[in-house]
Image (spheres, rainbow, N blue to C red):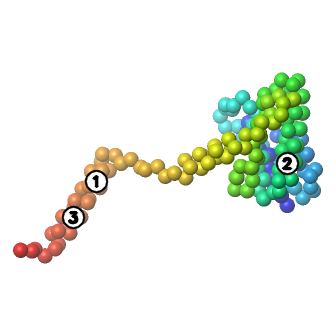
Amino acid sequence: MKQITIKPTNPRDVKPEDAEELAKAIRSLHPDYDVKVLDKELLGTGVTWYEVVEIVIVQEITRGLLKHITKFSINWARQRFNEQGGKGRPKYFRIYGPNDKPLKAFVLKTPDSKPEDLTKDLLETEQIRAKYLNKSTPKKQTFYQKLINNTSDFVSRLTHSLTQPFRK
């Protein structure tokens, strides 16, 4: 069974019941697809002009399935534009595969525009994010930590030299 999660990043922009229409379309591809809409609690404020929707697919998928999900997402976005009187905000989609691997990103700026493929930008952004998340930052030592380390180093050398036999 394929698990697919639809996550609107701001529930004030895209309510779970609105995203449920997209979930129904994806479910129609195959009865074994477990498609859920994540009702995410809003933490803070949204800072982007776009309505952002993430789609996460837990298992490996074919290009054909990715193409269908992309097509359904575009149709759903166009329908949202129409419901908003054709003057809604741009709709941005990020589709991730297993292990949060970016598969596709695109934006639809108007109901009649062609989707702009932003997959390359998403891949670059994710690489930069991964680089900084995995990077261990050196811890700065305070003056007293340095003093303690140097003092203990001095004491251990002094102790070592005092315990050695005296040489002439």
Identified by mark 3, the residue type is Arg
Q: What SS does tag 2 mark? A: helix
Label placed on residue 106: none
Identified by mark 1, the residue type is Ile
Q: Earlier in the sequence, mark 2 or mark 3?
A: 2
Q: Would you say residue 17 is visible in this rendering? A: no
Label placed on residue 148: 1
Mark 1 vs mark 2: give the one in front: 2
Label placed on residue 67: 2
Graded by Cα atoms within 10 Å as few (under 14), some (14 to 19) or many (20 or more), the crowding at tag 1 reads few
- Can you give x and y, in whole percent of width and height, for residue 54 in the image? 76, 43
> What distance separates the C-alpha of mark 3 from that of mark 1?
14 Å
Q: Earlier in the sequence, mark 3 or mark 1?
A: 1
- Can you give x and y, in whole percent of width and height, for residue 26 in the image? 88, 48
- Foreground: 64 or 17? 64
Question: In this picture, is 163 found above or below 11?
Answer: below
Residue 72's quadrant in the figure?
top right
Identified by mark 2, the residue type is Lys
Q: Earlier in the sequence, mark 1 or mark 2?
A: 2
> What distance separates the C-alpha of mark 2 from that of mark 3?
68 Å
Residue 62's quadrant in the figure?
bottom right
Graded by Cα atoms within 10 Å as few (under 14), some (14 to 19) or many (20 or more), the crowding at tag 2 reads few
Q: What SS does tag 3 mark? A: helix
Mark 2 vs mark 3: give the one in front: 2
Q: Residue at x 91, y 45 (%)?
A: 25
> What distance separates the C-alpha of mark 1 from that of mark 2?
61 Å
The residue under label 3 is 157
Q: Would you say residue 150 is visible in this rendering? A: yes
Q: Residue at x 9, y 74 (%)?
A: 167
Graded by Cα atoms within 10 Å as few (under 14), some (14 to 19) or many (20 or more), the crowding at tag 3 reads few
- Can you give x and y, in whole percent of width and height, for residue 6 in the image? 80, 46
